[in-house]
Image (cartoon, rainbow, N blue to C red):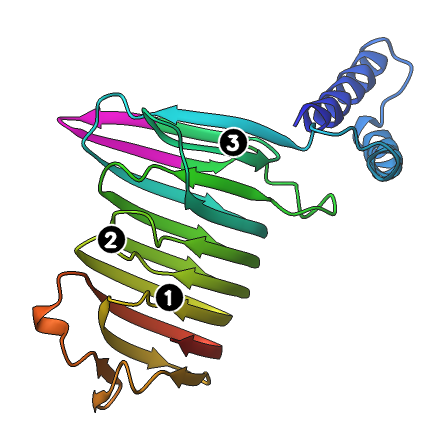
Amino acid sequence: MRRNLLFWGSILILLSALFLLKALGITHDVWGYFWLLAVGLLGVWFIVRALWHPKGEEGEQVAIELQGAQQASLHLNHGAGRLHIGAGAGAGFLLSGDFGYGLDYKTSVEGDKLEVNMRTASNFGPFLGEGFDWNLSLTRDIPLSLTINSGASESKIDLSELRVSYLKLETGASATALTLPAQAGSTLAEINAGLATVNIRVPDGVAARIRIKEGLSSRSINSVRFPRLEGNVYQSPDYDQAANRVELSIETGVGSINIQ
């Protein structure tokens, strides 16, 4: 993140220097020289990034406290790269994690509910040859609502130990491995994927009702656990009586769906 600031700080210094030269009457073509020098500076920047990778400088460590909340809503806006989500936040924390290229986030509390919105602090990771790698550990202690927006990504989302009551996942060209909650009671999950491979594991002891709307996707669904009812609907025989169950809605474009 500091190197991003160094790069864009250099661009601003270069631009101000050219305007100074114009004010002094040394040059009149500010923008012509600017783009010429900026391209050269960008080339130098690529070389510096390729040669200089100090350990620990690529990510930002962030931990967000629960602030006494009894439930939380978490919105993640993640770009291209790798996304790993699991359980393991420390006592009193909603989440802790490492965020490549830094993180911008806002928190608010209304009543007993904590709401957090998170997005990468930079839009130039893929442009500079690297993705946004996020590794999050979430709390097991309170019910969670989780919304994830990602682009071209590789995602491993393990909710098996979490109390996620609502999940919404929107992703583009991606590969996603999703494990649903094992003991969250009732969970509603909505997945909208473009050019994607989606592998979903429903933990043992969890019933599911699955609705699929697909384009040119192939599907593989465990028909022993989730017999087909009609059309694109599959359901566990004990769904209505199950203590832990998930209602899963999936819409995909091109790719594959695997549910076990």
Crowd band around label 1 with a 10 angstrom C-alpha radius: few (<14), some (14–19), many (20+): some
Mark 1 secondary-structure assignment: strand
Q: Label 3 belongs to which residue?
A: 103
- Vertical placement of 182 versus 53: above or below? below
Residue flagged by tag 2: what amino acid is it? Tyr
Q: Quadrant of residue 220?
A: bottom left
Please name whichever residue, 135 or 14, is drawn nearer the observer in this view of the structure: 135
Query: Residue 11 placed where, x, y %?
Result: 76, 25
Q: Is residue 86 left or right of residue 143?
A: right
Asked whether disc 1 touches disc 2, contact meaning CB atoms under 8 Å apart, the reply is no
Residue flagged by tag 1: what amino acid is it? Asn
Query: Residue 126 placed where, x, y %?
Result: 67, 48
Disc number at residue 192?
Answer: 1
Tag 3 or tag 2, which sits nearer the N-term?
3
Q: Residue at x 27, y 26 (%)?
A: 108
Q: Is residue 116 left or right of residue 171?
A: left
Specify the farthest residue to the front: 205
Disc number at residue 166?
Answer: 2
Residue 172 in view in this figure: no
Specify the farthest residue to the top: 24
Q: Which residues are magenta?
A: 107-117
Please name whichever residue, 235 or 46, is drawn nearer the observer in this view of the structure: 235
